[in-house]
Amino acid sequence: MAMAIEKLIEQGLPPEEICITFPSIETYASLVQEVFFQFHLPIRILQGEKVITSPLIQFILQAFELPQNNYPRKKVLSLLKNNYFIYKSEFMGQSATLDGDLIQKIVNKSRLNALSLEDWREKLDLLRKTPSIWKKLKITGEDFDCQTAMLIQFLESIPNGNNSF
C-alpha cells in the first residue's frame, strides 16, 4: 500500500488528497505509522465514529430488515417516520410523495396489523373498500388509494434476498 501511495505522489497527486480507510484503525495504526515512516510518507490518523452507528446506516439496515421480519407494523411505521425517509413516485400520472404521518393514521385508525407483504396488500385493499375509514381520516378515496398504493410499492422495492437493486 505504501508503495502505491509513494507512486501516486511521484505522479503528482498531492498527499492531502489521498485517504485510506480501515475497518478498525486501532488494529493497524502502529503498523501503518511505522511503514509510512519508513517510506517517508506523511500520515495523519483520524478515528471517527463507527459507520454502523451512523443514523443513515441504521435507517438503511432497518429497511433491509423489514422483509426478513415479515414487515412488522411498528417497524414499517418507524421507517416511514424516519427523517431520512422520502419516497416519491407516480400515481395516476402525477408525482406523489408517500406521507408517513398519513400512513400511520390509516394504520392506527384501522388497527391494521399485517403479518407479511401479501397481508399488507390484502388488508389495505379491504380498507380501500371501506370508505368510512378514510372519511374518518378526512381524506379522499383518491388520496387513500395513492398513499396505500405507494406504501405497497415501496415495501415491494426493498430487496428481500430474492431480488436485488
Image: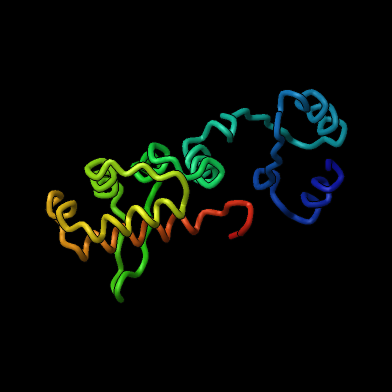
Q: Position of residue 145 (x, y in %)?
A: 27, 63
Q: Position of residue 41 (x, y in %)?
A: 79, 37
The quadrant the N terminus occupies is top right
Residue 11 lies in what quarter of the image? Answer: bottom right
Residue at horizontal 63%, vertical 29%? 46
Residue at horizontal 30%, vertical 69%? 95
Residue 155 lies in what quarter of the image? Answer: bottom left
Residue 61 lies in what quarter of the image? Answer: top right
129 to 30, vertically: above or below: below
* Nearer to us in this view, 83 or 64: 64
* Nearer to us in this view, 92 or 68: 68
Number of numbered discs: 0
Residue at horizontal 15%, vertical 54%? 132
* Nearer to us in this view, 115 or 99: 115
Residue extending farthest to the bottom is: 93
93 to 21, vertically: above or below: below
Q: Position of residue 140 (x, y in %)?
A: 16, 61
Q: Is residue 128 left or right of residue 60?
A: left
The quadrant the C terminus occupies is bottom right
Q: Position of residue 114 (x, y in %)?
A: 40, 45
